Amino acid sequence: MNENAQVSRITKAKRTDIRRENERVILAAAEKVFAEAGFGGATMQLIADMAGLPKANLHYYFATKEDLYRKVVHDIFEIWLRAADSFDNAPGPKEGIGAYVDAKMDISRRHPFGSKVWASEVMHGAPVIQDYLETTLREWTDGRIAAIQRWIDEGKMAPVNPRHLLYMLWATTQHYADFGHQVETLNDGRALTDRQWREAKDSVKTIILRGIGVLS
Amino acid sequence: MNENAQVSRITKAKRTDIRRENERVILAAAEKVFAEAGFGGATMQLIADMAGLPKANLHYYFATKEDLYRKVVHDIFEIWLRAADSFDNAPGPKEGIGAYVDAKMDISRRHPFGSKVWASEVMHGAPVIQDYLETTLREWTDGRIAAIQRWIDEGKMAPVNPRHLLYMLWATTQHYADFGHQVETLNDGRALTDRQWREAKDSVKTIILRGIGVLS
DNA sequence: CCACAACCTGACCAATCGGTCAATATAATT
DNA sequence: AATTATATTGACCGATTGGTCAGGTTGTGG
C-alpha cells in the first residue's frame, strides 16, 4: 500500500507536470508572439508553431485567444508590481529610488517581451486590464507618491512633483525594453553588453538622483 | 483666354484638392486606427468607416494596407525630426535641452496617435522603417551626442553619458503620448489640462536640467 | 459639346482567421 | 484488466480579411 501510494503520488505529479509544462511553453511562446506582432497581428497558429504544439492543443489549455492574452498580461503585471518592493522600507530616496531603477532595468532586460505586451496593451487603451489600472495600479501609485512626498517634507530630497517623477522612472526604465530594438540598432545592431547595461543603469540613476537633489 | 486660364487654374486646383483632401482624411483616420488597434488589428474597413469613404476608395489612393501604414509612419517621423531643430543653435544645454523637451512634449500632446504608431512600429522590430533607424536617426543621434559632448567638454554641464541622456529625453516625453491612457486613468480618467501639461513639462525639465548640473 | 482622364464604388474572391469537434491515445484508479 | 479521466489532434466551419474589378460618375481641356 505504501508502494502504491508512492507510485500514485509520483504519477499524479507527472500528470500535473504535463499541464504545467505545456501551459508554461504556451505562455512563453504567446508572450513572444504578442510582443512581436501585437494582439491583432498574433495568430494562434504562430503561437502553436513556436510552442511546438498543434493549434487545437492550445485551445485545450486556453479557451480563447483573449484568455491566453489576458494571462500573459496578468503575469507581467505581477512581475512589474513585485519590483515595487525595492521602493519600500528604504531609509531615503537615494536608496529607494536607486533600488527601484535597478529592479525596473533588470525587468526590462530579462522580460523584454512581457514589457512590450504591457506597453502595447496600455497604448491600445487597456481593453483587458483597465480595472487593474483603476484599482491596483492606482493604489500603488498613490502610496508611492505619498512616500516621496514624505521624503520631500523631511527635507531628504528636492521638492519635485512626485507623480511626474514616477512617470519619468517608468518611462526611462521601460524604454530599454519597449524601444530595445531602436537602442540595439543605434548600438551597431548589437545587444547591450553587461557593461553597457551597467552604464545605462548608472546614467539613469545619476541624472535622476542628482535631479532630485540627493547627489552633489 | 485669360478667363479660361483662370477657370482652368481653379478647376485644376479643385481636382488637386480632391486628391489632397481625401488623402488627408484617409491618413488621419488611418493614424488613429493604427494607433488604437495596431497594424495587425487595424482593418481597411474600419479606416474607411472613420474616413467616411467606401473601402474601395482607400485602395484607389493607397494600393495596400502596408503602403498606407508606411505613409503614416513616415509622416510622424518627419514631425519627430523637425522637433530636433530646437536643439540646434542653442547657446548651451539649458536652452537647447529645455527647448527640446518643450517641443517633444507638444508633439506628445498634439500628435498622440502618430506617437503611438511610431512606438508600435519600433516595438515590433521596425519592419518597415528599419532603414530610417539605420540612416537618418543614426546620423541625427550621432550629431546630438557630439553636441552634448561639446557642452560637457566646455564645462557647461555635468559629465553624463550623452546617449543615455537622449534616451531619457525620448522616453520621458513620449511617455505622455504612448502611455497617455494610463496617465489619464491615474488622473481620475480626465485628460490633462493646460495647467497640468505645463506642470508636467516643468517637472521633466527641472529634474533633467538639475540632473545634468545646469540648475542649482 | 465632346472626348479623355481622374475619381468613385458595389459586388465579389481567395486566403486566413479563431474556434469546434469527434476520434484517438495516454495516464490514473479500482 | 477494466474503467474512467485527462490529454492530443486532424479535419473542418463560418466569419472576416486585404485586395480586385468592371462599370459608373464627375471634372477638364480642346
Image (cartoon, coloured by chain):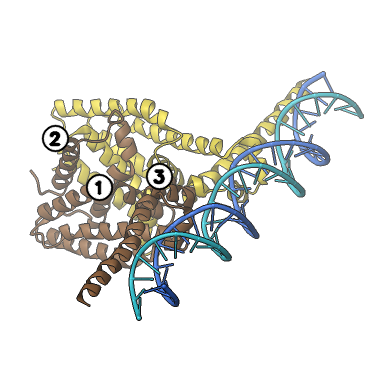
Chain colours: A brown, B yellow, C cyan, D blue
Query: Along the line of sight, which residue is nearer the eye, A216 or A119?
Result: A119
Question: In the image, which is nearer the foreground, mark 1 or mark 2?
Answer: 1
Query: Along the line of sight, which residue is nearer the eye, A99 or D7?
Result: D7
Distance in Å between CA atoms under marks 3 and 1? 16 Å
- Position in image of residue B110 (x %, y %): 43, 45
Indicate which disc residue B158 carries: 2
Point out the tag, 3 or 1, that comes first from the N-terminus.
3
Mark 2 is on which residue type?
Ala
Quadrant in the picture for the C terminus of chain B: top left
| Cβ atoms under marks 3 and 1 closer than 8 Å | no
Q: Is residue A72 visible?
A: yes
* Callouts 3 and 1 on one subunit: yes
Q: Disc 3 marks which residue?
A: A36
Quadrant in the picture for the N terminus of chain B: top right
> Which residue is painted at 33% across and 51% down in the image?
A114
- Position in image of residue A34 (x %, y %): 41, 50
Q: Is residue B79 left or right of residue A174?
A: right
